[in-house]
Amino acid sequence: MSFFGFDPAIPRGGGHPDKAPGFGAAPDPFAGISQHQGTGYEDEDAIDFDDTYDGLGDQLDETNDDLNDATFGGIEATTSTLSKPVGKDFDFHGQTAKVSNVINEEQFRYNRQHVSRKPQNLMKQTRPFKTGYEAYENPDYIPDLQVDVSSKGQTRTASGNVQASQSSSILSAVPQAAPAAAPARKMMSLEEVETAMRAQPKKSASVLTTQGRQQSQTMTYPNIPSAHAQHPLNVQSQSSAPVNLPPQQLSYQRASQNRVPLIPQQVLQAELPGQSVPNTARPGDAPQAQQRSQMIQQSSSQESAPHRQILQNPKRQSAQLAPRPPEPPLPPPQQQPRVFTTGAMGASQQLPIITHPQQLMQLSEEDRNAFLLEDAKRAKRNHKIYMLSRNNGLMTPQDKNFITRIQLQQLMTATGNTVEQDPDAVLSEDFYYQVTSQIRGGARQNPQQPLSNFAQTYLFQTGSRHGGPGRRQNRGGDNHMQRMEMQVQRAVEAAKAKPKNKQLVIEGSLGKISFSNAKTPKPLLNIKRNDSHDRPQSAGRQATSRKVLPAKLSISGRKSILRNIEAVYSTLMKMEDHERRLPAAPANEEQMSVAHHAWQEVMESLGQKLWDDLKVMDPIVEESSILHPFIAFLSYPKGKKAIPRIFRLLDEEKRLTILTMIVVHLNILDVIQNVQPGASGFRPSLVAREEVELFSQTVMPSLFAYVNEAPLQIVIGLLGLIVSRADMQVVLRTKVGLNILTMLLSRAELVKQSQNPSDQEWNQWVNLYNRFFDVIEPMLGIIFPGSVHDGQEMYVWQFLAATGIGANPDQQQRLVVAVKDRVMETVVQSKTLPPDMASQRLADVNLFMRAIGLDVDLLG
Amino acid sequence: MLFFSFFKTLVDQEVVVELKNDISIKGTLKSVDQYLNIKLDDIGVLEEVRYPHMSSVKNVFIRGSVVRYVHLPAAAVDTALLEDATRREAEQQATKPR
């Protein structure tokens, strides 16, 4: 094994392959647990090593080693280690000793973390034959200088205050004195145990396990140096007495002893008296009795004691932590209780308190089994607790407080002063998310709620976790909650009181340093904007760009239009916000008049502002090169998109005004001007087509909605405007133009059918229609876009249908003549198309044909 | 906060995050925070061949500062609303005391 550079001495139990004779012979209630905790690290390690050492090394093919010398330069050592005793020149241990130091340290460290895994099986029957010197038979054995802390704890507590009073000068003398005092009243020496064991070898096999465990408690520290080993009796006597201490007590006492923190060597010395002192002190027995009673007290709450203590008894915890020696930290307090509970738990289970193996012996078989089972369960539970609480105590309550405060502070600044913030502010902070999730039917009904109640939510969560399923609903938990609440409140107060210092300006630096918080991650540089710089720059840009684009709108014009649009939007949003704030329906009229009046006033003023922003009423300058502001407004996509929202908020009159504006400027609307087919089959640009699409989707429905309610007079007026003012040739060749005409014509037809307009009105309409028909008739040939193959002409057929319905027979005749060719072409072409497309095309044509009392089928 | 607010709405959508080191990672957006750190699930690297070491990675946490672009699913973006949100944000910035 040393082949791999391991010091075989290190796995302390491992050196004794006879570690558990008879252990497996009897039913071992700890078999399952022993893996986790029943065995010590060393022991575990030993098992692993022996079990896993599958003898592969022995199977190595050694036969062809003859050439090794040639290969490896005649180094005999490699082979000789296997076959011959190690020569003196090969200072193996000397070298590995260095390693073993490290390993020892590691081991110690590990032990500290896993103290609960007490070595327990080591002792057994082999123990009595040990002198304690075994380790030293190994010439290179290096005693573990770090005294095993657990034994320290035990001795310390056992000796308790008694020891504290003893001066350390005694200490060196004590080892000699110890044996004399050794025979403890209640203790059974190992020899006695042995005898008992031999007396009933079979029955007690399982008992032995327990016994062994208890004994091994203290005995598995063979490397507690000589003083320990010199007095085996002492060791034995120690075995059970100190075991019964709850960890709190351990540490408590340790804390109460006004001892200076010990460095390991000192500890080592101190340990020696520690082991013997209990014996000398025992005659008085005061400490022990005291301990026992405490133990019983605590036995009921034992299972959660170790970590609950840590959680909830900060004072005690800190007291315990305070005197901690600098480099060898104490064992985590929860490591001891398992041993101790062996006895203690029994009390709560109506089983006798077993503090000594002998007591176990005296029990009946049943009781013993019950006890052992109990013990196993307990051990399991303790182990679980230990696993859960492994890192308990890493942070002091102060640390936790501090962290909590930071977190809360962060929360407070993150959401600002949630208490003072009105929901609108929160909404605007997170507008997109809130609204989107509402639109999509998100989970939150009230978008403000989770945010404004952030602190409470946070608290509530921790609270529910604390309240747990009935387990820890004790006073301590409540206190904890209350403390948290208090803290939150205080944090809120503090955050409120604290003036917000968001930036730090260092003198002479260019920018400011901003502090980040959760809401506004730190802007790296915040350079003060200089307003005076703005103007000349933009002026310069204007000048240059004007040169470049003389034909287009000047940048300033474009800029001002865009600014207008933004102004409209901002007013629009204010109105929409204000709309949401409509006071709830009040109980009585009086309240209504007050609250609603105020609301109404604001709404009206905003509406007026919106109207002004739209600039619809700006004077129309004929033949001006400058586009009317409203038409310019409509020439931008976002202007178009605003229309439906604006229309909703405007009254009838203003809607009509807008409609009139559009109709009057039909010629120069971008959606009409930019899609004029050129001479040679010009296809409008993609952008222009998209604009048309957008216009049809946004503006047209609003206009439709209005016209669909409009009286005939208005329809007459609008059509009259178009006929008299617009350039029909331009209008007719565009989709938007035709759509508007269709809209008006069909409305007139609907009015005629449903409302029975007066003869005068109707005559007026017919006259207008006749004029209109005369104007469009010569142009009917050019209204179709592109060739017949394009299939983008449904709106044309719609227009023709609307025209045809209102036409008199003579006009219908002329209409048919004008578009006859196209009809025929479409019918012919549809025969070459797949059925669904063909029927679509024919249906389009039929719109028109049916309007004048025909059908494409007749043409078939 | 606009971006944060925006990205929150994309949770559970599939996005492509292009990093400043040219790796493009496609995955389901699991969460985003105010630093625009991003958590992705079920990820795949667009150029598997170039970054084979990423092929076994199933989910990632991306620090916001290393993101160059996030390719959005167009369908999941409400443009009009986003425009409005932008206006609000701008308004807030303007009215905020500097």
Image (spheres, grey):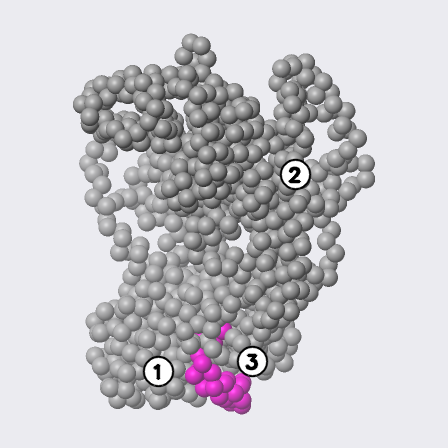
| Magenta span | A281-308
* First in residue order: circle 3 vs circle 1: 3
Q: Residues within 10 Å of mark 2 (few under 14, many from 20)?
A: many
A486 or A765, nearer to the observer: A765
A688 or B48, nearer to the observer: A688
Chain at numbered mark 3: A
Q: Amino acid at mark 2?
A: Asp
Residue identified by numbered label 3:
A160
Mark 3: which secondary structure?
A: helix
Marker disc for residue A357: 1
Magenta-colored stretch includes residue A284: yes
Q: Amino acid at mark 3?
A: Gly
* First in residue order: circle 3 vs circle 2: 3
Decide whether the magenta segment is chiefly helix, strand or loop. Answer: helix
Q: Residue furthest top?
A: A680
Residue identified by numbered label 2:
A613
In the figure, residue A342 lies in which quadrant? bottom left
Q: Position of residue A852 (x, y in %)?
A: 30, 29
Q: Residues within 10 Å of mark 1 (few under 14, many from 20)?
A: many
3D distance between C-alphas at marks 3 and 1: 23 Å
